[in-house]
Image (cartoon, grey):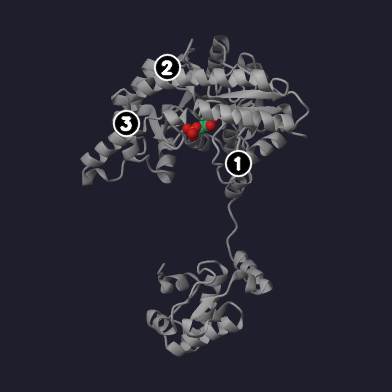
Amino acid sequence: MRYNIKSILRKHGFDTNLPYTNIYQNLYHALRDSIVFGTLNENEALPPTRLMAKDLGVSRSTVIKAYDKLIGDGFAWSKGGAGVFIAPKKMMALDVVSELKSTKEKRKPHLSKLGLKFSKRINLREERKSIPFRPGLPPLDLFPLVKWQTLSNEYWKKVTSSELTYYGSSGIKSLRKNIANYLKFYRNIECDPHQIVITTGSLHSLYLIFNVLVDKGDQVVTENPTYPNARKILEALQSKIFYAPVDKEGIDLESFRNRQPKLVYTTPSNQYPTGVRMSMDRRIKLNDWVQTKQSIIIEDDYDHEFSNWENPLPAIYSLNNDDRVVYLGTFNKLLHPSLRVGYAIVPNFMLDSVLALHQHSNRFISPYLQKTLNAFMERDYLNDHLRNIMEVTARRREIFVGYFEKHLAAHISLEEKSQGLHLIGKLNRNINDKDLSEYLGQNGIVAHPLGNYYKNPKEGNGLVMGYCSVNEILMTKKLRMMAQLVRSYKS
Ligand SMILES: Cc1ncc(COP(=O)(O)O)c(C=O)c1O
């Protein structure tokens, strides 16, 4: 690929305004740093001296001198008439390279405390490609690609140049109205579309909400176990987290009744990851409690379509008439996580701050996505899809559970409480969940260690597994593989 050598060298300090006598040294340093810091790749040819001199506006003898010094110091080599080439990395003097790198690192500014805190608490490894049995995925093979493609094409056919502009952060009006309607019919929630904020998903909503509410040292309550990403944001913000146990009715209110937390983060429809459904009594008590405190509830209803399909219980949001519940929903679970569209119903007292933070970070969710999703809802494709996946997830769950009972019961006991997209398997043998998860991962099977969801990983030893993201044939094949791996696994 051709490159603009002047711009590359400028990045590494090349400056034509220096006095003539210093230009060769300056060019040498800029070329050397471009090589050491990887802007120019090993074994690539450097531009011919005449061309380089012309591009940089310097004399050819300056370029020749700089190239000769690069060759002399082992950063390049001359291949007779073919030109000058960048030396392979392994041929360069390692001590010179590491000295240059460390000097350059020292010149970088320190990261902020917040930046460091965030990076310490997150695992940024590349996402694994394997899908079975990653928790939280819907049946990806059922997403109606052709319908979506038709709607996308329609959008791009109709869009006018004036629509390619900036938009408001809360989201397009028609989508917010349709979400309000959807919540009314599918979740029995009445809300004002003006309080709905379109985000990239529930995690984004949590990030915005936590950031506008929590100062360093503030008390907050989360469930234990809980969604690790939510906990990591709260930790990075240096809040004082109280981890409330979860009993068979949901979050244990009595454990924090007398505390003064600023917020309570909860997943009542399908406690994450245990699958406990909060009882009606607990919902009412939690709602009564919050009205007596300077606090709010963050209700993460991340997979309510799945967990409330049969015998729905009201959202805490709809029990509350005091604007003290933030309700979070997402399309990333119902459709697919690569979509990146979700929403939050935000209490009025914090709406402006949430929108301001949204505007300063994400600005807004792509109108193309918002409008295509809106059309998807208006044509009832969402409704059709929902019915379709409900049937299929039930079937896949049956196969998954049946296989476990027949072939894996001696090693793993499935807990079948969860109505959502994942199941927990408790380990019967003396195996560490983290080690087993690693081992399965190396063999193409994803199963998250249950311990990761707890404040103290020792509190849970099991696997969290999604059971419905792939078709029945692949699922059975992977289950067979998993059974072999687990049976032969030696801790
Ligand atoms: C409990 C819980 N909340 C929120 C999310 C995030 O969802 P989204 O993909 O919409 O950001 C997840 C994702 O797994 C989750 O498990």
Instruction: Measure the alpha-carbon separation of dots 2 and 1.
Output: 33 Å
Judged by depth in the image, the label closer to the viewer, 1 or 3, is 3
Amino acid type, mark 2: Arg
Helix, strand or loop under label 1: helix
Quadrant placement of the C terminus: top right
The residue indicated by pointer 2 is 187
Above-or-below relation of 201 to 50 = above
Specify whether tag 1 is near ligand 1 (CB below 8 Å): no
Which of 128 and 246 lies nearest the eye of the viewer?
128
Helix, strand or loop under label 2: helix
Q: Earlier in the sequence, mark 2 or mark 1?
A: 2
The residue indicated by pointer 3 is 147
**Mark 2: few, some, or many residues within 10 Å (few <14, many ≥20)?**
some
The residue indicated by pointer 1 is 236
Instruction: Measure the alpha-carbon separation of dots 3 and 2.
Output: 25 Å
- The residue sitting at 69% across, 27% down in the picture is 462
**Mark 3: few, some, or many residues within 10 Å (few <14, many ≥20)?**
few
Instruction: Measure the alpha-carbon separation of dots 1 and 3.
Output: 41 Å
Helix, strand or loop under label 3: helix
Q: Are marks 1 and 3 in contact (CB under 8 Å)?
A: no
Quadrant placement of the N terminus: bottom left
Q: Earlier in the sequence, mark 1 or mark 3?
A: 3
* 291 lies left or right of 388: right
Q: Are marks 2 and 1 in contact (CB under 8 Å)?
A: no
Tell me if residue 412 can be seen.
yes
- The residue sitting at 60% across, 34% down in the picture is 228
Judged by depth in the image, the label closer to the viewer, 3 or 2, is 3
Which of 347 and 75 lies nearest the eye of the viewer?
75
Amino acid type, mark 3: Lys
Amino acid type, mark 1: Ala
